[in-house]
Image (spheres, helix red, strand yellow):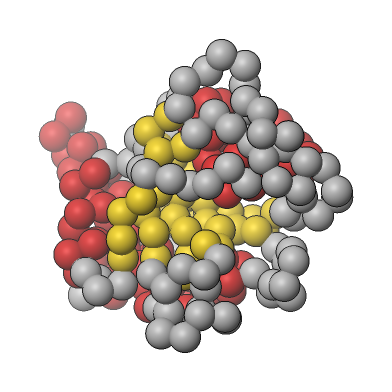
Amino acid sequence: MILSRLEVLRGINFNDMKILVTAFGSFGNFKINPSEIVLLEVKHKWQPIVGVKIDFKVLDVSFQSVREFYSLIDQEYDLILNLGVASDEQKTRFELKAKNKMDGEDINGVNGGDAEIIEGRKDRETTFPIEILHSVHNEFIDKIIFSSDAGSYLCNYIYFMGLELYLKATVLFIHIADFQNIKGSVDPQSQSEIVTRIIAGFIDYRKDSIILLA
């Protein structure tokens, strides 16, 4: 189903749609971060669509790395899709909210200190179309759960920063199941299919918007 949808989309000429997909690198007991594995799988299998540019980036697990990256990226991304591993989680999690809170020690020894990310700001909700999330959830209903708690570590940090800094972009965070350590977790191939379906669903959604506005 995913391939057939993408084949249809490849026949549509978009006006330079830009998509960014990020994951995190190694940290703690993760010599290779599961989110990086899934990102590389998506990148390897992705077939180009005319008028759609996708950038893939793996970031260090540090607050500084996220800040510096966001200070340099293109402000004109239509979709920013962040991936990160959910330790001890068996299923893929669609994160619906980002908290204005940073905590935990990163790979550089910097601790968030249980502080606000941006003083005085409220928590943020995803700007990704909820109907696409429900549609993909229904396709992989035994593999996906919805969550309103992205934690307070780097996953939540990159999510909140994206929602705050890039108001014109659609932003979503997906927590990847810990298939390296937790028996019965969703396998990386299935999770890469889920991520691909999210991207294709967004492109399809924008295509319909373009048609309606034409």
Q: Residue furthest bottom?
A: 183
Vertical position of residue 36 compared to residue 15: above or below = below
Q: Residue furthest right?
A: 108
Vertical position of residue 209 compared to residue 93: above or below = above
| Residue drawn at x 46%, y 68% as measured from the top left | 89
Q: Which of these two is toward me, 164 or 119?
A: 119
The answer to which image quadrant residue 26 occupies is bottom right
What is the x, y in percent for residue 123?
A: 45, 27
Q: Which of these two is toward me, 113 or 71?
A: 113
- Residue 142 visible to an observer of this rendering: yes
Q: Which of these two is toward me, 58 or 98?
A: 98
What is the x, y in percent for residue 20?
A: 53, 49
| Residue drawn at x 52%, y 70% as measured from the top left | 88
Locate residue 66 relative to residue 209 in the image: left or right.
right
Q: Residue furthest front?
A: 114
| Residue drawn at x 17%, y 39% as measured from the top left | 211
Q: Residue furthest top?
A: 120
What is the x, y in percent for residue 12?
A: 27, 54
Locate residue 156 relative to residue 29 in the image: left or right.
left
